[in-house]
Image (cartoon, coloured by chain):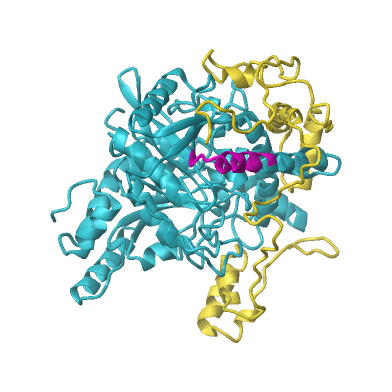
Amino acid sequence: MMAPSSTINPNVITTQNTTRDGLITSDIAPRSAADLPRFLGGSTLIPPSPHYHPPMAEPISPDDVQRLARLARLAIDDDACADIAGRLTRVIDHMDCLRTLDLEGVAPMAHVSFKEGIDETRLRDDEPGETLPPGLIAAMAPQAHEEAHEQAQEAPTETDADVFFSVPKVIGGGSS
Amino acid sequence: MTLPAHAGVLETASAVRAGEATAEEVTKAALARIDALNPALNAFLQVFHDESLERARAIDARIAKGGDPGPLAGVPIAIKDNICLSWGKTTCASRMLEHYESPFTATAAQRLLDAGAVLVGKTNLDEFAMGSSNEHSAFGPVRNPWDTARVPGGSSGGSAAAVASGMVPAALGSDTGGSIRQPAGLCGCVGLKPTYGRVSRSGLVAFASSLDQIGPLTRSVQDAALIARIISGPDPLDATTSPLDAEQIALFDDASAPLTLGIPPETTGETVDPRAREVLLGLIGSLRAAGVRTVDVELPLPEHAIAAYYIVAPAEASSNLARFDGVRYGHRAQLAPNDTLDDLYIKSRAEGLGPEVRRRIVLGTHVLSSGYHDAYYTTALRARRIIKSAYDDVFDRGVDAVLLPASPGPAFRLAEKLEGPGIDPMALYFEDAFTVSANLAGLPGISVPAGFVDEAGTRLPIGIQCITRAHDEATALRAAHAIEQITGAAQVAPAGATA
């Protein structure tokens, strides 16, 4: 039995009553005193744990955003890059609070597992099942739309497998 | 028809099954209310008038022939528009999928159909479920039915507004970081996020695959239990679905069973709006007076959970949304004669994806990129395990359910937390402060109305959530029901009368 006021998990490090200044940019302010005082008031950010020092919270520049956008195949104009850089720097700053957790020796958990230590991989037998007809898949594609519909109606099984997604010429460049 | 207005799921199905009302009458009434209220609320992106009436008549015909119409016979249900149906469009409230027609129906939606439900339309959401206010929809924001100048929460804001305003007795939403529970709280209805793996994600457009889960929004705990049970269970199309029996998900209404609720200091702490805090403190007092035992518990702080979540979720999203490339489905940009395959990707994504989705893809790309992967992504995954372990410890020590607010405060005004000078980019993310930990830990959570605050004469709902062990939805439902016994059934919002 547990005492009504007991603290249940002593292993979790809390950040109460500690402060750290200088990580939150000064031009960002809550709209009112009642607006998230603890999140924005500095009391949530504390000196890094002696156990763990990930190199975090480097500001993100507009050039960084441009580089990341290229990696993600996104086009973002210069004004938007500057805006996103400021926002992401603020978001990344907040993530610095993870440094206050003692994470040494803790294994990363990419997905939840409710049976620790047991191989719970549930692979089905490798048997062919029903799949969507290729013509139906191609019908979803913006470029193959009409052709696929016509083919599916005229010869539902034979020619469906012959439908393709249309893309610009890959080898040798040039037009689509 | 003897069915009262705003009847719940169970009440409606029972009346239709007993012949006291026809599915057609019930469907017509729902469609009429949707048509009347949707211009003010923008909760629905599509309404299936013809298909719904056709289906309702088929259900009535089956009943007339003596057949079993199913446990949801004739119940009108709305579907969040990131869940695929084989008719209509599945837009995810994105220009990218504005014209997308799914060739198949999601498992969860199919199970509702198999149970006799009438799926009357698709509800609005934040684009690709990324947002907490529904203001990130490409098709305009949803309005809160308690005050149309305010947000309904998000991302399942359309589903929450539809249920709270009495358009439908139930809707499906999806919850990646609170997207069922937070809007349910802000709109004053019940929202259940089942355990990760309870409900098949087949046919749910992926946002963050290790966190996403489909669940119901209703106006009663009992209705949430019924819908959750029907949509749960193993599915060969989603290898993460649990083999456990979905019949476990039920409201066992045993008032004599002891209940111990764990309350972390954050639940009534200074991050919670003072008026909401009063409501929550009053409710906790009433629970104690009703014989519920409460204990103080300590969990990782919401700011840690938010930090971990806004690394993990964008990381997974940046990978999942790579599929929207203008080739296989969705928007395809008009190309210039010499444009390359890369130009096709870049232009199509630039035109099709909205600002918040692009920001999250950039953030996710950053935390996964070479040199930052360990510092951010791996760190977040370690924090994720700590969060799950902390919940395990709390439950191992005899706590049945943890009580947390559904959101830091009542519904806020449109644009109040969106973007602009002086608005902290983290402000909207902190709306998820109390909900993301259940997703990171894979646990079930149910949001239930706790009461109202008065905002210049307008009543705004406050929600509270109960989080329990994995696969113990039954206890979450029992705890939520104990709260419902005190606060009374969820009320139907005025839905635009205050505009």
| Magenta stretch secondary structure, dominant | helix
Q: Residue at x 27, y 72 (%)?
A: B68
Check the image and report above or below for A82 versus B86.
Answer: above
Q: Residue at x 68, y 23 (%)?
A: A15
Estimate the x, y position of residue A159 in percent, counting from the top left.
61, 83
Q: Residue at x 59, y 57 (%)?
A: B330
Which quarter of the figure has residue B350? top right
Visible in this render: residue A9? yes
Visible in this render: residue B46? no
Check the image and report above or below for B469 versus B58.
Answer: above
Could you say which is closer to the camera, residue B191 or residue A163? B191
Could you say which is closer to the camera, residue B142 or residue B401? B401
Check the image and report above or below for A130 versus B57.
Answer: below
Q: How many numbered markers are drawn? A: 0
Could you say which is closer to the camera, residue B190 or residue B318? B190
Check the image and report above or below for A121 versus A130.
Answer: above
Estimate the x, y position of residue B223 in percent, counting from the top left.
34, 51
Q: Colour of chain A?
A: yellow
Estimate the x, y position of residue B184 in percent, counting from the top left.
42, 39
Q: Which residues are magenta?
A: B386-401
Pick the quarter of the image with the N terminus of chain B.
Answer: bottom left
Instruction: Please give the letter of the chain rendered in cyan.
Output: B
Estimate the x, y position of residue A147 in percent, counting from the top left.
58, 73
